[in-house]
Image (tube, rainbow, N blue to C red):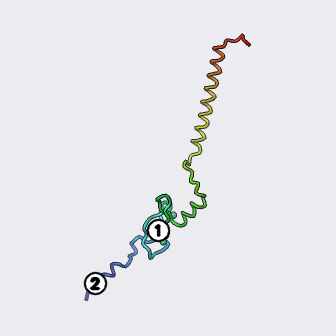
Amino acid sequence: MGQNHPVAALVVAPQVAACANHAQREAIGICVQCRTRVCSECATKVEGINYCVSCLAGLAVDGGKRAPERTPGSRGLAYVSAGAYFVALWVLVWGYLEVMLPGGRW
Ligand SMILES: [Zn+2]
Ligand SMILES: [Zn+2]
């Protein structure tokens, strides 16, 4: 007759999120980079963020430099604008000197 084995419910269904590398293991997280499901063994937390093995290797290749800002252009622009400002100020001061010291002295 219909003997229901409760154990059957414990069998991991294909729907359950399993680790991409270990089909038998339950995924405990998702890699933030490639969205790969990772189990506790495959996941490595870097600064509280889950990374899979391959992405972690990518991080290692990067040398862990992880530049705080990925827009070197903005910083360069800041330098340029600061330089332009300094030059303008210098010209202004030079102009004042020319005005306050009327020619004829030299
Ligand atoms: Zn990944
Ligand atoms: Zn795994």
Exactly how many numbered labels are in the figure? 2
Q: Say above or below: 38 vs 96.
A: below
Whole-percent x, y for residue 26 in the image: 42, 72
Give amino acid for label 2.
Asn
Along the polypeptide, which appears first: circle 2 or circle 1? Answer: 2
Badge 2 is on which residue?
Answer: 4
State yes or no: Cβ of the residue under disc 1 lies below 8 Å from any atom of ligand 2. yes
* Relative height, residue 71 to residue 28 (above, below): above
Report if the CB atoms under discs 2 and 1 are less than 8 Å apart: no
Q: How far apart are the alpha carbons under marks 2 and 1?
A: 32 Å
Q: Quadrant of residue 57?
A: bottom right
Q: Which residue is nearer to you in this view: 104 or 72? A: 104
Query: Callout 1, which amino acid?
Result: Val
- Taking the spot 66% from the left edge, 16% from the top edge, the residue there is 98
Q: What residue sits right under mark 1 in the picture?
A: 38
Q: Secondary structure at mark 2?
A: loop
Q: State which quarter of the image contains the C terminus.
A: top right
| Crowd band around label 2 with a 10 angstrom C-alpha radius: few (<14), some (14–19), many (20+) | few
Query: In the structure shown, which secondary structural element does the residue marked by tag 1 occupy?
Result: strand
- Outermost residue toward the top? 104
**Residue 39, horizontal then vertical, whole percent:** 46, 70
The residue located at (44%, 74%) in the rendering is: 25
